[in-house]
Image (spheres, rainbow, N blue to C red):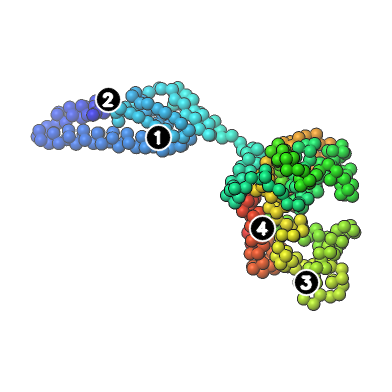
């Protein structure tokens, strides 16, 4: 049925055809042609409008979707819209009030010219942390669908520690600012400035305030894991290996620190004697001068089951699928994200200079991909595949979130 403006237009065109000097049969065909064109155009326009309004997200919706009028019933639920009309031509505009709500903003207007779109909410660090946790938890749910981490007895790890004063569980992964974090907790407990705590003092005192999760009973662990805040920081495993090599082997040969030199010699002797062809007597005796390919051979040959904590996987050390961490920090944005974590675990009265919160070199705060890849250039492809497989759990949980390097 043709109504309203379309009926008026048809009548005008019909009268115009009547006034023309032409045979009646031709006039009839002209009238029929005009009416048919108008009718088809109206139908197509109505169908197109209905389809567009039903299938377009509100933030991209054409303005004419807001003018379906007269005999229309409208229901807006999230981004789904249902339009019901008794007549396909009931699309003449009106100044009806409409309200369209969506994630990006809210339209409220009595007149289409007054429609305003509020800008999207800025993504906060809270959003980032929540998204990371959700992503990791979802992967863990698939890997361990029947596990209940509250019934889980953690391995004999000394790296999942509890601070009962601040009600915090922290997985202190070596080579991811773990010394800085535990030093910071020690400073807070003993009301000292960060700079005043020496290496030796930290080494002999920090466990006074931070206890292994393993020492608590099953009931206590359940309370701790359900009520305390839990956090850890993530670093690319290939970068951790490189950092461990530089610190424990390259520096060991130049350091006067007895602990570091002893560490380098202990592992260095094993590596050189096992993987170096025709080693000289001095290298075999001192363990100094380990080469990076030899170190990688040692790691891939021994596996991670009883690996040293400096290159063991985060998955093994922290058990993230059994202890669901609230905050998963990024080592390459360590200062900003550490401040966020400190605020959320109650460390808000830092007494030492803010620039010394975490003693991490500036060069470490962004992943130098080219430098890391250069380190691994001399490593055979077969060993690279072995490394990737050894750290597959870390890669699966965190690789996409933190853009781990793929060799």
At 70% from the left edge and 65% from the top edge, which residue is drawn?
300
Q: CA distance from mark 3 to mark 4?
A: 23 Å
Q: Are marks 4 and 2 in contact (CB under 8 Å)?
A: no
Q: Are marks 1 and 2 in contact (CB under 8 Å)?
A: no
Labels 2 and 3: the sequence-earlier one: 2
Q: Earlier in the sequence, mark 4 or mark 1?
A: 1
- Identify the residue at horizontal 84%, vertical 36% (top origin): 351
Q: Position of residue 73 (x, y in %)?
A: 37, 26
Query: Would residue 9 be found to the left or right of residue 286 on screen?
Result: left
Q: Nearer the viewer, residue 392 or 353?
A: 392
Q: Which is more foreground, mark 2 or mark 3?
A: 3
Give whichever of discs 1 and 3 has the lower sequence position: 1
Identify which residue, 149 or 266, lies in the foreground. 149
**Quadrant the C terminus occupies:** bottom right
Horizontal side of 154 relative to 25 (left or right) equals: right
Element on which disc 1 rests: helix
Residue 274's mark?
3
Measure how far apart labels 4 and 1 are at the Cα level: 49 Å
How far apart marks 1 and 3 lie (CA) works out to: 72 Å
* Residue 45 drawn at (x, y percent): 32, 35
Q: Residues within 10 Å of mark 1 (few under 14, many from 20)?
A: many
Question: Element at badge 2?
Answer: helix
Q: Secondary structure at mark 4?
A: loop
Q: Earlier in the sequence, mark 3 or mark 4?
A: 3
Residue designated by label 2: 4
Q: How far apart in space, not on screen, are marks 4 and 2 (Cα)?
A: 71 Å
Residue at mark 2 to residue at mark 3: CA–CA distance: 94 Å
> Where, by quadrant of the figure, is residue 358 drawn?
top right
């Amino acid at each position: 049925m043709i109504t309203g403006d379309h009926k008026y237009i048809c009548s005008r065109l019909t009268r115009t055809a009547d006034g023309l000097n032409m045979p009646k049969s031709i006039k009839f065909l002209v009238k029929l042609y005009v009416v048919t064109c108008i009718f088809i155009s109206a139908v197509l326009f109505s169908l197109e409008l209905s389809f567009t309004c039903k299938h377009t997200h509100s933030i991209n919706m054409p303005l004419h979707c807001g003018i379906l009028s007269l005999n229309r019933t409208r229901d807006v639920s999230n981004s789904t819209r249902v339009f019901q009309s008794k007549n396909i031509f009931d699309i003449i505009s009106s100044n009806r009030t409409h309200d369209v709500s969506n994630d990006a903003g809210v339209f409220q207007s009595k007149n289409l010219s007054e429609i305003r779109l509020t800008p999207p909410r800025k993504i906060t660090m809270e959003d980032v942390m929540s998204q990371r946790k959700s992503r990791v938890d979802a992967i863990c749910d698939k890997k361990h669908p029947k596990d209940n981490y509250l019934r889980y007895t953690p391995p004999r790890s000394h790296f999942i520690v509890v601070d009962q004063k601040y009600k915090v569980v922290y997985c202190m992964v070596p080579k991811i600012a773990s010394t800085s974090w535990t030093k910071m907790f020690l400073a807070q407990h003993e009301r000292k400035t960060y700079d005043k705590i020496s290496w030796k003092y930290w080494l002999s005192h920090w466990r006074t305030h931070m206890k292994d999760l393993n020492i608590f009973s099953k009931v206590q662990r359940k309370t701790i894991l359900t009520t305390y805040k839990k956090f850890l920081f993530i670093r690319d495993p290939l970068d951790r290996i490189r950092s461990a090599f530089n610190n424990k082997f390259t520096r060991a040969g130049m350091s006067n620190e007895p602990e570091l030199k002893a560490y380098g010699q202990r592992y260095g002797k094993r590596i050189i004697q096992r993987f170096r062809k025709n080693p000289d007597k001095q290298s075999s005796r001192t363990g100094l001068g380990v080469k990076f390919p030899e170190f990688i051979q040692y790691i891939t040959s021994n596996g991670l089951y009883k690996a040293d904590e400096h290159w063991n996987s985060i998955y093994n050390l922290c058990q993230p699928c059994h202890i669901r961490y609230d905050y998963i920090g990024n080592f390459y944005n360590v200062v900003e994200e550490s401040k966020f974590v400190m605020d959320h675990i109650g460390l808000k009265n830092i007494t030492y200079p803010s620039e010394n919160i975490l003693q991490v070199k500036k060069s470490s705060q962004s992943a130098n991909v080219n430098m890391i890849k250069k380190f691994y250039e001399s490593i055979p492809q077969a060993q690279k595949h072995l490394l990737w497989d050894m750290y597959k759990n870390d890669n699966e949980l965190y690789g996409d979130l933190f853009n781990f390097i793929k060799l």
